[in-house]
Amino acid sequence: MAKDLTQSEIRGILKKDFAPDLNKFELVKSISDLVSKNRTIGQEFILRLLSRRLEFKAYDIVIDSLVRQVGLFPYVEQDDLSLRDSIAYELHKPEGLDENIVFHHAQAEVYYSLMRGENIVISAPTSFGKSLIIDAVVASKRHNNIVVIVPTIALIDETRKRLSKFKGDYKIITHPSQEQKIRNIFILTQERAIDIIKKVNVDFFVIDEFYKLSPNKSDEERCYILNQVFYLLVKKGAQFYLLGPNIEQVTTELLENVSFRFIKTDYKTVVSERHIVKVAEGQNAIDKLISLASSLKEQTLIYCQSPASANKVASAFLQSGVFPLAQDNKNIVEWLQDNYHSEWILPNCLSKGIGIHHGKIPRAIAQKCIKLFNEGKINYLICTSTIIEGVNTKAKNVIIFDNKIARTKFDYFTFNNICGRSGRMFSHFIGNIYLFHEPPVAELPLVDFPIFTQNSDVPEKLLININDEDLKEESKKKLQKYTDQTLLSRDILRQNSFIELDSQLKIAAYIENNCQQLENYLNWNSVPLNNQLKVICNLIWDYFVDSNKRVYGVSSGNQLHFRINQFREAGSLRNFISDFTDSETTLDGINNGIELAFDIQRHWINFQFPRYLMALNSIANYVLTKRGFPAGDFSYFASMVECYFTSPYVVPLDEYGLPMQISLKIGRIIELEGSIDDSLLKLRDFNPESKGFSLIEKEFIYELKEYI
């Protein structure tokens, strides 16, 4: 073998079975020379070397030295280190965490910067280990109130489980109704944080996936709420750590006396191999996908653009006859069929070791699919963009089957995020990415924080939440019409600023002009009469939704009224699903009906209707009382709807990973009607044995108990 090996030659050797006459010393020496010349380039080859470490036992000391040179301390064999390397190793161990945890060099830089009190904004690859730095900051016990803002409820639960190891020092809060203690970790989405953080003295906060602060047409409303949360937290003077992947630059300043350091690093702890998949002329792309997936022996994510595309792929996998029965999943399969629908595509897929993960699947069940995947009980997880927002998986392979999110082609940033799901520290040194389309043009985003830059396109519903002293002159002019009007107070406009300000004023004017006719429809308490609910639904649709399109199974105020009553009268989710499936004769029709029921339940029942109802309540009360009419109180009914017309503990426990069918079953055995905290305490001591729970139900219960 030639002594001066090129990068391409080294890569080629390490990818294949070794030839009998391979000179391993010369190979290791060539990698060492690469590291000496360029550590960044050399790091890839060290990772490739580590993936085959057992074949290089004679060179352990040399390999450890190379690993230390590029700062990959988590991969170092500590027992064999020299004195110099041992000192470096100890300097990369954070205080307060398990003694076996050690940072790589780039992690340590971020950690020590935070320990010095700096504000850090970091763009780093998915495999970097950004979340472990949060754990280390918590372990330092320097802060009393820590806020972690995550983009999804699924990430609330994942983060809660990870940080539960600190429950002896901190109260972990994920829901607005939980009681606070002296020291708390709040793990919240921006919607939950907006009210809670106003009442908390925050010392340190984290925003995960911080790029979502920059406006995105597909999710503008959530972006602006996140900006409000960021603004409120910055105004409190709290130290912050914003993290995300694949960002080119942050193009903004914050307030006076608030500075931050932006760190952009490509420091990788795994190697990603990209493979273009060629579909022969006349060949069906899904047939090619099935052939590829069935040839892969380790955990594989399959990315699809939408739930409909994911279901199409899943159906084809089922019908292919290629995938054998997965006996380990028999219990969960039967339980899902009994509690949802016997022909639902998800349990039928699980029976063949295939999972599905997208936004229409109930939260606890989606979490279970991730767990089964990470445990190796399912080999394939067919997913949409819900999986790329920080949910951790142990995927060796990622197949990118579609190159879109919904109907829009994804950009290079999103493409990189999806690719970042392949490989995992300590599980897979090398991840494989299989592409059914050419990758998009390489261009990473510049992230802007609109609540601080206040550019001309920033909407008034965001500007209304900024204190006067922080508003630019142009912003004050934009808000003039809203500050001069007398229909609604600024507090009401702010409180409901997820709704367009003009829409709030229009409905206020309508109520004011029709007070006598509307009084009896707007001043009820507790539970509305049917005609009162109908008027409410039409007001919400006409002024807040204001759409001619079908929105999650609803296309008018009258239909919204019908859906709410339909859900209430069904009495259970299974019965509600039956309303949409009993007349269907095809598997696709049945599955579409099931997912329509899920859509209505999650979007309207659990989220939008209660939120719109309380916004209408505040606006109506302001107008009615100003005109001398009695006010109403919609809060009880809003809570009823949000809790699926069942018990208040059902929704929080679903987020904790316990399906509502099981929590209701427990609620018939022990008293769970108190606060969430009380319910969790009772569940921690609850023994499901000898109480009529199936094996899978007990499994769900024990998984919940592990982290409370």
Image (cartoon, rainbow, N blue to C red):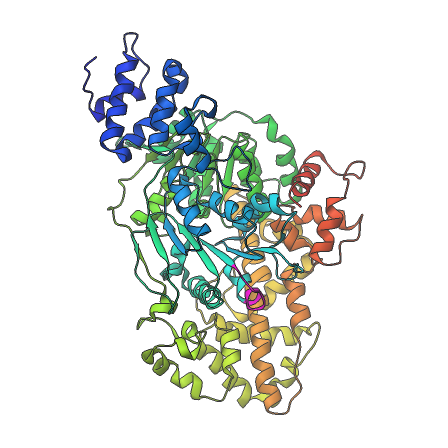
- In the image, the segment drawn in magenta is 195-203
Determine whether 678 is above or below 349 in the image.
Answer: below
Query: Relative to residue 533, is residue 133 drawn left or right?
Result: left
Quadrant of residue 295 within the rendered picture: top left
Q: Residue at x 63, y 30 (%)?
A: 330
Q: Residue at x 31, y 37 (%)?
A: 436
Q: Position of residue 111 (x, y in %)?
A: 44, 46
Asked whether the viewer can see residue 507, the reply is yes
Q: Is residue 699 magenta?
A: no
Determine whether 295 is above or below 97 in the image.
Answer: above
Q: Position of residue 184 (x, y in %)?
A: 61, 56
Asked whether the viewer can see residue 584, the reply is no
Q: Nearer the viewer, residue 605 or 301?
A: 301
Query: Relative to residue 620, is residue 109 drawn left or right?
Result: left
Q: Nearer the viewer, residue 12 or 283?
A: 12
Q: Is residue 198 magenta?
A: yes
Q: Position of residue 630 (x, y in %)?
A: 67, 86
